[in-house]
């Protein structure tokens, strides 16, 4: 009977599958255990687009010189990164060191995924004062779970040539001057598809500056540790209204519901579709259009409320953490030490990449090394704010509710008061959720 | 040729019909045409409010940009290996199951069929964590075999149902007649069953191919080491925190769609022929 | 995010069998021993390891307080019915259910109607035009969903999207260059609908066309002699013959469209204001944004049960029709 021979083959397939499964499992466990003899290799996960290859290499060289071990760097993509980090950290052989965005750190610090480095803190910081926006989110109940790697924040970037055509030769010193300048540019160039400023409605980092500038806050924590959304407060609503009016006046109608990546705002700027942006660095623009070298100006976003002051900025950046399940704890700590050392911070983080360094002392000592276009970012960084340091914050970023919230206001789908009320309710729920 | 007998003056009648067909073709091919058109544009022309309908002069900058992105070759190889393995595994395994389901009677046959259909109803994103946990228990994480098994399982319900349908369409009498004529079992399988079931095998392998080739959800979570990444994961790398490389992304999408379209084109004659093969009238 | 099976990237169904008019029943041979089970073993093994066991785990997780801490430490606390209660009491539940149902219905209806029309058109076309239509169908079918969705985003982009430009050129709707389709829930759904239908029609059209071509010509000739009109011919001859394939295609469409995920997530992320959040998106955000895998699992279990209830009648019919042949 023919079918019987088929059954035999079928049996063989099942057996083959089983053996393959078992065989591979034993080989993979052997591979992970094999790190003990000879040169040890540390696996490090870095994020795409953050540190340049040269800067990462500088850290690796310092680490390899200090320990004699090797480093294997794997670049990770931002899309769904928390899911990827979560599942990687849940495995028995996780990456040893991971770069984690500072707003995401609480998610992993508070849930037992990261190694406690409180005991090493003084050794790592070597007398420096780490920026609170970077180390704060990594601190849970007084214990530290990550060391800062670099900070980044936003400033205004403008095209000097286009601004000069409208008769403006110096950066504005106040918000009033800024809007006057933008009015001139708007009147000077009415080509379709051109906007004086591009400030997308979903670009919440920039929008939050207006809230903080008006004295508002995202959320506050009471003595019992409970978070409450504060966007309904009069100050926050005033900031939101100011942002809406600014956004609607100077950015295109099409930008009210988009974010900074669709369409890519650096590319828009590089191709002359807009003359002014709020962004973290000029690197992408120069990569897109090298001929703009020398034609870019930067300044910290002027305060709407206080003349002469600048808006508080969102302090972004990344921390380096050690996986709790990593078998190479000491080597991993040595890597953190190499990355936070003053030499590497000065030469690589500031010198090569122009990012903001991790301590207030470095902020002062490195300022002279910077090109003029980077100075504005450092100015802005001196007045910076972080997001609520709680695991629930990651929910707000990953369900994109904060992007929706600002787009709701910019497009007029909801009134400022209604949007604030709805979003406060979501904040109350998400920030207090246990993970 | 038309199965609809009433055809008075075919040429005249067909004018509006052909116009409708042409319009349909235009509409349906437009997104693909636009993707290819965009991919060949020089960088500065992509963000242009007035679209250009022809990509001339052709620019390969976006493709160079896409291929130059690290990991392309490794990920391409992984994708090819995984996809090939899934197609073979799924079709062979489903064929066995389909033979049992159509040629033998046994207890639990209906239950098996229904269970297989129900499994298909689970939203895949919800299965990511449970599949991750199961493969972790089986020590299969970070191993291409995990992807092969996962995709094979995802396509099996459809594959089994489809092959079962095709086998149903082949009269048992044919095999019995061949047996009477003294043909051996291998001869029957090779000469009679296989050619007849071939369209089904092609149809199901297409399904398996597309599923395995395109999955990002599981590939992102089950493969930790970069050496085991597949193309869809690579595709995502064009969008970073600092910006989206649209030209590169569209070119990379074109590259990733290419093997599937080529595969379809190669077999399309047999695919459509296979679908109409059953038209032999009784 | 991306997977493929939510979209209709499936090849033609077993038309060879389904389309054939019922005829003499065939008795499969009965075997009392292990043979059939041996043949089913590999399929069962793969399905059990990668879908069956995880499915059981999914149900278990839906009764647990399963978050990141549980994932990292393996320490799990039971939640009883808390996850289901949370879903039940969520004010989002009803709108999400209604939205999922309505959207699924709109997708299935659109796919089937357009697919049937295209199939009928193909049956009447000359060989050259038919090949052209087939090639267009196959190309859109072969497009990976992620790539297709990115292209869609590109087509409908404000300012730079070619669709807005074309619509503006027609002069019928005024200046649409600044229009953002994802600003309102209805137009956001409309572009998702277009995308999903664009990708699903090929499967349905080619399958139905294969079915159409199997209807014996003599039936139509007889109808022509009787002087039956086109609609009567369609109702009395075409439709009854196509019914088994239509049932299969409908059931698959319902399953796929109910769980549609990638296209919505990339194009709208469930917005604006949750206006395009379907069950799949809801379960995903609960699990992966809220890091409550328990609640995500509970929503998934609920949606499978719903889908089962919705399709039960047809599933039974489908299985029985197969057995009868």
Image: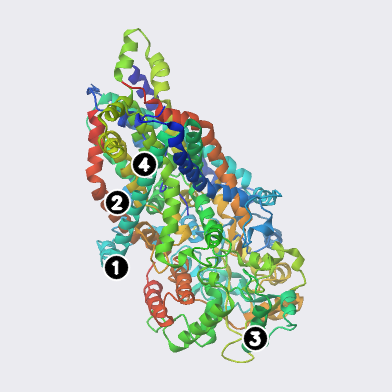
Of callouts 1 and 2, which one flags the residue occurring earlier in the amino acid sequence?
1
Q: Disc 1 versus disc 2: distance between alpha carbons?
A: 19 Å
> Image point 38% across, 42% down: which residue?
C117
Same chain letter for marks 1 and 4: yes
- Residue located beneath label 4 in the image: C116
- Residue located beneath label 2 in the image: C304
Q: Disc 1 versus disc 4: distance between alpha carbons?
A: 39 Å
Within 10 Å of disc 2 (Cα), the crowding (few <14, some 14-19, many 20+) is many
User: Looking at the picture, does residue A272 appear above or below residue A165?
Assistant: above
- Residue located beneath label 1 in the image: C90
Examine the image and state in which quarter residue C284 appears.
bottom left
> Image point 70% across, 48% down: which residue?
B58
Q: Image check: B245 left or right of B162?
A: right
Q: Mark 3 lies on which chain?
A: A
Q: Where is residue B54 in the image (x, y as percent from the top left)?
A: 65, 50
Q: Disc 3 versus disc 2: distance between alpha carbons?
A: 58 Å
Disc 1, SS: loop
> Image point 49% across, 82% down: which residue?
A240
Q: Which chain carries label 4?
A: C
Disc 3, SS: helix
Q: Where is residue B145 in the image (x, y as percent from the top left)?
A: 48, 40
Quarter of the picture holding the C terminus of chain C: top left
Of callouts 1 and 4, which one flags the residue occurring earlier in the amino acid sequence?
1
Within 10 Å of disc 3 (Cα), the crowding (few <14, some 14-19, many 20+) is some
- Residue located beneath label 3 in the image: A180
């Amino acid at each position: 009977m023919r079918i019987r021979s088929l059954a035999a083959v079928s049996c063989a397939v099942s057996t083959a599958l089983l053996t393959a499964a078992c065989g591979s499992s034993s080989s993979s466990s052997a591979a992970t255990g094999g790190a003990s003899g000879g040169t040890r290799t540390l696996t490090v996960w870095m994020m795409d687009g953050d540190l340049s290859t040269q800067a990462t290499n500088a850290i690796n060289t310092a680490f390899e010189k200090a320990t004699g071990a090797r480093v294997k760097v794997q670049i990770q993509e931002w899309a769904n990164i928390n899911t990827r980090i979560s599942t990687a950290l849940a495995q028995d052989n996780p990456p040893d060191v991971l770069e984690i965005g500072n707003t995401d750190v609480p998610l992993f610090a508070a849930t037992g995924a990261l190694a406690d480095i409180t005991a090493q803190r003084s050794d790592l910081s070597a007398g420096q004062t780490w920026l609170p926006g970077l180390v704060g989110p990594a601190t849970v109940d007084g214990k530290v779970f990550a060391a800062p790697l670099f900070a980044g924040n936003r400033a205004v970037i403008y095209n000097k040539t286009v601004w000069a055509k409208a008769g403006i030769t110096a950066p504005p010193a106040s918000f009033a001057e800024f809007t006057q300048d933008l009015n001139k540019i708007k009147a000077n160039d009415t080509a379709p598809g051109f906007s004086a400023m591009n400030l997308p409605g979903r670009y919440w980092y920039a929008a939050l500056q207006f809230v903080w500038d008006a004295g508002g806050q995202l959320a506050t924590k009471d003595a019992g540790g409970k978070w409450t959304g504060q966007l309904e407060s009069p100050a926050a609503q005033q900031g939101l209204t100011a942002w809406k009016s600014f956004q609607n006046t100077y950015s295109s109608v099409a930008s009210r519901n988009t974010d900074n990546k669709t369409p890519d705002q650096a590319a828009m700027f590089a191709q002359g579709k807009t003359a002014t942006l709020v962004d973290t660095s000029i690197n992408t623009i120069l990569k897109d259009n090298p001929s703009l070298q020398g034609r870019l100006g930067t300044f910290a976003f002027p305060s709407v409320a206080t003349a002469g002051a600048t808006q508080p900025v969102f302090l972004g950046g990344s921390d380096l953490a050690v996986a709790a399940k990593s078998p190479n704890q000491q080597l991993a700590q040595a890597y953190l030490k190499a990355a936070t050392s003053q030499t590497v911070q000065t030469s690589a983080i500031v010198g090569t990449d122009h990012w903001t360094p991790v301590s207030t002392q470095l902020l002062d000592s490195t300022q002279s090394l910077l090109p003029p276009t980077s100075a504005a970012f450092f100015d802005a960084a001196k007045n910076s704010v972080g997001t609520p340091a709680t695991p629930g914050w990651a929910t707000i970023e990953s369900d994109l509710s904060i992007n929706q919230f600002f787009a709701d206001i910019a497009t007029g789908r909801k009134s400022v008061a209604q949007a604030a009320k709805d979003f406060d309710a979501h904040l109350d729920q998400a920030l207090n959720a246990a993970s | 040729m038309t199965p609809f007998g009433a055809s008075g003056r075919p040429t005249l009648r067909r004018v509006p019909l052909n116009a409708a067909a042409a319009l349909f073709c235009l509409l349906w091919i437009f997104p693909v045409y636009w993707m290819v058109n965009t991919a060949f544009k020089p960088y500065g022309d992509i963000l242009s409010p007035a679209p250009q309908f022809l990509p001339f002069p052709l620019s390969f900058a976006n493709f160079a940009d896409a291929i130059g992105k690290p990991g392309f070759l490794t990920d391409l190889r992984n994708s090819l290996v995984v996809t090939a393995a899934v197609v073979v595994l799924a079709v062979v395994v489903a064929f066995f199951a389909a033979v049992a389901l159509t040629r033998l009677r046994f207890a639990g046959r209906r239950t098996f069929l229904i269970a297989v259909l129900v499994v298909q109803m689970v939203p895949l994103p919800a299965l990511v964590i449970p599949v991750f946990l199961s493969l972790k228990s089986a020590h299969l994480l970070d191993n291409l075999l995990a992807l092969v098994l996962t995709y094979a399982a995802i396509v099996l319900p459809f594959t089994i149902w489809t092959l079962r349908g095709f086998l149903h369409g082949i009269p048992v009498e044919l095999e019995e007649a061949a047996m009477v004529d003294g043909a051996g079992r291998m001869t029957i399988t090779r000469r009679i069953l296989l050619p007849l079931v071939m369209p089904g095998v092609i149809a199901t392998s297409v399904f398996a191919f597309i599923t395995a080739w395109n999955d990002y959800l599981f590939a992102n979570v089950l493969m930790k080491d970069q050496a085991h990444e597949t193309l869809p994961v690579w595709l995502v790398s064009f969008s970073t925190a600092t910006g989206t490389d649209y030209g590169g992304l569209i070119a990379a999408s074109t590259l990733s769609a290419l093997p599937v379209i080529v595969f379809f084109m190669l077999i399309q004659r047999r695919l459509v022929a296979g679908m109409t093969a059953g038209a032999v009238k009784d | 995010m991306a997977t493929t099976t939510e979209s209709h990237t499936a090849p033609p169904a077993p038309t060879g069998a389904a389309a054939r008019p019922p005829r003499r029943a065939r008795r499969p041979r009965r075997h009392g021993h292990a043979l059939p089970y041996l043949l089913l073993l590999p399929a069962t093994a793969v399905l059990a390891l990668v879908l069956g066991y995880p499915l059981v785990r999914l149900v278990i997780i839906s009764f647990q307080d399963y978050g990141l801490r549980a994932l990292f430490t393996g320490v799990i606390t039971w939640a009883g019915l808390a996850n289901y209660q949370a879903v039940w009491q969520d004010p989002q539940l009803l709108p999400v259910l209604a939205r999922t149902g309505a959207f699924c219905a709109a997708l299935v209806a659109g796919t089937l109607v357009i697919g049937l029309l295209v199939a009928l058109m193909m049956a009447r076309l000359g060989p050259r035009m038919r090949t052209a239509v087939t090639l267009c169908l196959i190309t859109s079918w072969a497009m990976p969903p992620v790539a297709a969705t990115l292209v869609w985003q590109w087509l409908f982009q404000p300012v730079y999207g070619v669709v807005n430009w074309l619509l503006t050129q027609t002069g019928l709707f005024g200046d649409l260059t600044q229009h953002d389709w994802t600003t309102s829930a209805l137009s956001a759904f409309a572009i998702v609908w277009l995308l999903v239908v664009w990708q699903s029609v090929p499967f349905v059209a080619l399958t139905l066309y294969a079915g159409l071509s199997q209807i014996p010509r003599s039936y139509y000739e007889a109808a022509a002699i009787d002087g039956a009109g086109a609609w009567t011919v369609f109702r009395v001859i075409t439709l009854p013959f196509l019914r088994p394939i239509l049932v299969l295609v409908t059931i698959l469409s319902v399953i796929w469209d109910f769980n549609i995920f990638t296209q919505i997530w990339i194009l709208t992320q469930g917005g604006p204001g949750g206006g395009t959040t379907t069950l799949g998106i809801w379960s995903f955000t609960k699990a992966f944004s809220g890091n409550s895998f328990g609640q995500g699992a509970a929503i998934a279990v609920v949606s499978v049960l719903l889908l089962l209830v919705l399709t039960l009648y047809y599933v039974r019919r489908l299985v029985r029709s197969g057995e009868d042949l």
